């Protein structure tokens, strides 16, 4: 009898709690105003290091947040930081307007910037925003709309296009890019090769992000057409129960 009474109280408590709030199962979210974090209005990408410190590609530079304190690190040319990615060696790679490079911490945790523009052939040292960065172990790949840069063994390979590079994503086992003229391309043996030229894809198919699933597949997000599962032999829509997610725009 006592056990039944306790169970009834607990059940009612849960019910009243559910009535009072509709957030059960949702993570706690704390919003910070730009006046607090000391940067610009827009944050474009985010990365996290092994210590849990967060880094944001911000309009005013690279923002760091350790859970308590914010710090802003502007680029030397004072331009917008569009992208950032962590490498396994602790470097924080960033891409901005006409600038690529990395921040690295000193013994006190303060970051200093090293530009990689001088690694580029002189004719390629002027470029637009760097929108995507992918770290591939000790290699790093950067995307602007007109060029892809591949940093390998401290040397920079350039892949220009007469069209537009629209997307770059993946990992060291499965790196994809999207070109406005050639569609999806896979990087292999130092070259970008056509990948599964599937005529059934929507004409306005636009990849926006990629998540590696295992060693041989990616989950692609798109601007208008939900999720796609990509393997070495096929690309197909990936549906989740609850179709609303299929109509969500992914960035």
Image (spheres, rainbow, N blue to C red):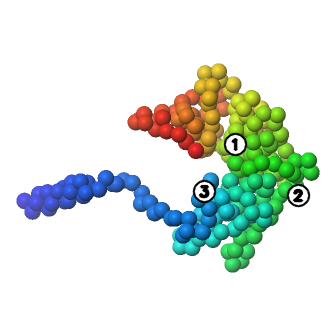
The mark found on residue 220 in the picture is none
Q: CA distance from mark 2 to mark 3?
A: 27 Å
**Would you call the spot at circle 3 few (<14 residues within 10 Å), some (14-19), or many (20 or more)?**
many
Q: Residue at x 23, y 54 (%)?
A: 19
Q: Secondary structure under badge 3?
A: strand
- Residue 57 in which image quadrant: bottom right
Is residue 218 at all visible to an observer of this figure? no
> Viewed as shown, does residue 179 lie left or right of 115?
left
Give the farthest residue toward the top.
199
Front-most of 210 and 114?
114
| Residue pointed to by mark 1 | 168
Give the farthest residue toward the right.
122
Q: Secondary structure under badge 1?
A: strand
User: In this picture, is 43 found above or below 249?
Assistant: below
- Give the x, y percent position of residue 174: 68, 40
The mark found on residue 118 in the picture is 2
Q: Who comes first in sequence, dot 1 or dot 2?
A: 2
> Is the C-beta separation of discs 2 and 3 under 8 Å?
no
- Residue 230 in which image quadrant: top right
The mark found on residue 43 in the picture is 3
Which one is closest to the eye, mark 1 or mark 3? 3
Q: Secondary structure under badge 2?
A: helix
Front-most of 51 and 79?
79
């Amino acid at each position: 009898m006592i056990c039944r009474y306790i169970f009834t109280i607990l059940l009612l408590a849960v019910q009243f709690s559910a009535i009072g709030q509709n957030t059960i199962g949702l993570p706690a979210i704390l919003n910070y105003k730009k006046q607090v974090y000391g940067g610009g209005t827009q944050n474009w990408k985010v990365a996290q290091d092994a210590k849990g410190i967060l880094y944001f590609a911000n309009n005013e530079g690279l923002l760091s947040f350790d859970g308590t304190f914010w710090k802003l690190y502007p680029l030397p040319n004072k331009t917008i930081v569009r992208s950032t990615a962590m490498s396994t060696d602790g470097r924080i790679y960033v891409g901005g307007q006409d600038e690529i490079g990395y921040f690295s911490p000193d013994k006190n945790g303060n970051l200093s910037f090293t530009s990689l523009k001088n690694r580029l052939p002189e004719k390629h040292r002027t470029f637009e925003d760097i929108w995507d960065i992918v770290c591939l172990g000790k290699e790093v790949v950067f995307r602007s709309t007109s060029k892809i840069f591949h940093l390998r063994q401290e040397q920079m390979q350039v892949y220009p296009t007469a069209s537009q590079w629209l997307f770059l994503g993946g990992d060291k086992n499965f790196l994809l890019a999207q070109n406005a003229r050639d569609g999806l391309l896979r990087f292999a043996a130092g070259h970008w090769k056509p990948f599964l030229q599937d005529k059934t894809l929507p004409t306005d198919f636009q990849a926006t992000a990629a998540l590696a699933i295992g060693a041989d597949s990616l989950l692609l997000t798109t601007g208008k057409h939900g999720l796609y599962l990509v393997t070495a032999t096929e690309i197909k829509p990936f549906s989740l129960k609850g179709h609303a997610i299929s109509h969500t725009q992914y960035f």
